[in-house]
Image (tube, rainbow, N blue to C red):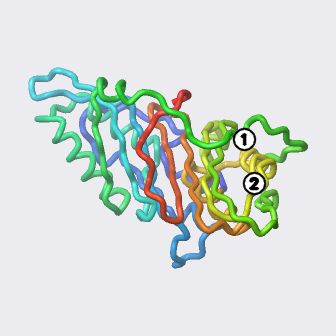
Amino acid sequence: MNQDEFNDTALGKRSEAVSQYTPSLLFPIDRSRMRGDLIAPGSELPFEGVDLWTAWELTWLDRDGKPEVGVLQISVPCDSRAIVESKSLKLYLGSFAQTPFASAYDVVRTLESDLSVTVGAQVVVDLLTISQATQAGIASLTGESLDTIRIAAPVYQPDAGLLQRLETGRMVSETLHTNLFRSLCPVTGQPDMASVQISYTGPRIEHEDLLRYLVSFRDYPGFHEHCVERIFVDILARCRPRELSVYARFLRRGGIDINPFRSTGKAAPSPTRLVRQ
């Protein structure tokens, strides 16, 4: 991705806080701008999935002017026309701060309507109380960790050629994960840290090579959604699994974490929270 491609977004620019409801703050980025090097225009998507956003800094006023707070869980389908630029979402949510709403239901209804219009697909929003968010607790990604594997001469730009499958003719089903993933914001250059989970059925993927491939994103400028889709497309093309799911949970920036999930058919995971989130 070229950093100059996204100069029209709010990211990396000084922005004044707005505390009265302003839906025009939302800025869409067409997914086609991120998928040009992965998927031919007009082609069917090779995956299903969803982007799971968690927003931790929502506050608004009740009808009497008393502040209310909550935690948002936002689900954006991966076949939507666009994503929401993350800083614009932060500014938009900030505009609720001095805005009275009759009920939490009205907050959710407003959010779902505005976000659905912005991305061009039906967005689902859940609003948790602080008590509900606390009860949800902290979870871990399932499967075998790759993080203790020693890798030699790592590279720090994605290279699908690093991926290898073992040609034994034997099919396996396994789930693997790493907490070592890092990429860069394509606009600001700031680091984005994540835990990534790979689940597949097919010829066994060499674990050392898979870890080297995931580590190779370390200096790569890509939005969260694009990184996950590139991982999915590269593994699908190089390793030819029958089934594949890629799930990443990124650390929050600006009070928001973005957690893309792409799969050949598995249902999206329930929103969860890892220890670093």
Image position of 229 (left or right of 79):
right
Mark nearer the N terminus (1 vs 2): 1
SS for callout 2: loop
Q: Residue at x 64, y 64 (%)?
A: 233
Residue 22 pos. (x, y %): 27, 42
User: Does the image show residue 253?
Assistant: no
Q: Secondary structure at mark 1?
A: loop
- What residue did someone put label 1 on? 146
Q: Residues within 10 Å of mark 2 (few under 14, many from 20)?
A: many
**Image height check: is 156 above or below 42?**
above
Relative vertical location of residue 37 with respect to residue 134 in this rendering, above or below: below
> Pointers 1 and 2 in contact (CB under 8 A)?
no
Q: Comparing marks 1 and 2, which lies closer to the viewer?
A: 1
> Looking at the rendering, in which quadrant would you find the N terminus?
bottom right
The residue that disc 2 covers is 158
Q: Residue furthest top?
A: 66
What amino acid type should be assigned to the residue bearing mark 1? Leu
- Tell me the kind of residue under disc 2: Pro
